[in-house]
Image: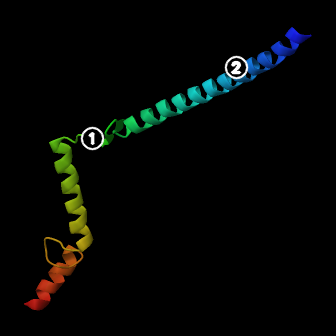
Amino acid sequence: MGLLGQLIPLVLLAVVLGGLAVVGYYIYESVTNIRTAAEERMSRRNIAFTKDGMRVGVRDMGNENYVDKTQQYLVKAWELSGKTAAGVGGNEKEGRKRSKKAT
């Protein structure tokens, strides 16, 4: 009974340590999978984590696309301001009416 009494605590210690090792391994695997998924999502948005910190990339926009977008916003601003080629009025007829009244 002396040898068996000394082995039981050793076996229980090995089982508990083995269980903790298995739990720790699954936690490590989960954290690794979450990190990989987060890095993949961030890379789609041009964000990368480096040893020095975080690096944000800028998506390249071609010159033609840049000019088109800029012109688009200028045209929208012009239209929203209510100015036309005929004058200050909201449409050409109003501009003509104002110019006729002035003469």
Residue farthest along the bottom direction in this orientation: 102
Q: Is residue 50 above or below residue 69?
A: above
Q: Residue at x 53, y 33 (%)?
A: 34
Image quadrant holding the C terminus, namely bottom left
Q: Which residue is mark 2?
A: 18
Q: Name the quadrant containing residue 54.
A: top left
Indicate the position of residue 23 as horizontal and vertical percent values: 67, 27
Q: Name the quadrant containing residue 57.
A: top left
Q: Residue at x 53, y 29 (%)?
A: 33
* Callout 2 amino acid: Gly
Indicate the position of residue 24 as horizontal and vertical percent values: 63, 27
Spatial distance from mark 1 to mark 2, Cα to Cα? 49 Å
Nearest the viewer among 10 and 2 is 2
Q: Is residue 80 above or below residue 49?
A: below
**Mark 2: which secondary structure?**
helix
Q: Name the quadrant containing residue 45.
A: top left
Q: Which disc number belongs to residue 59?
A: 1
Indicate the position of residue 17 as horizontal and vertical percent values: 70, 22
Say which of marks 1 and 2 sits in front. Answer: 2
Q: Which disc number belongs to residue 28?
A: none
**Left-right relation of 41 to 87:** right
Indicate the position of residue 85 as horizontal and vertical percent values: 13, 70
Q: Residue at x 13, y 74 (%)?
A: 86
Nearest the viewer among 81 and 5 is 5
**Mark 1: which secondary structure?**
loop
Residue farthest along the right direction in this orientation: 1
Nearest the viewer among 15 and 32 is 15
**Left-right relation of 33 to 59:** right
* Callout 1 amino acid: Arg
First along the sequence among labels 1 and 2: 2
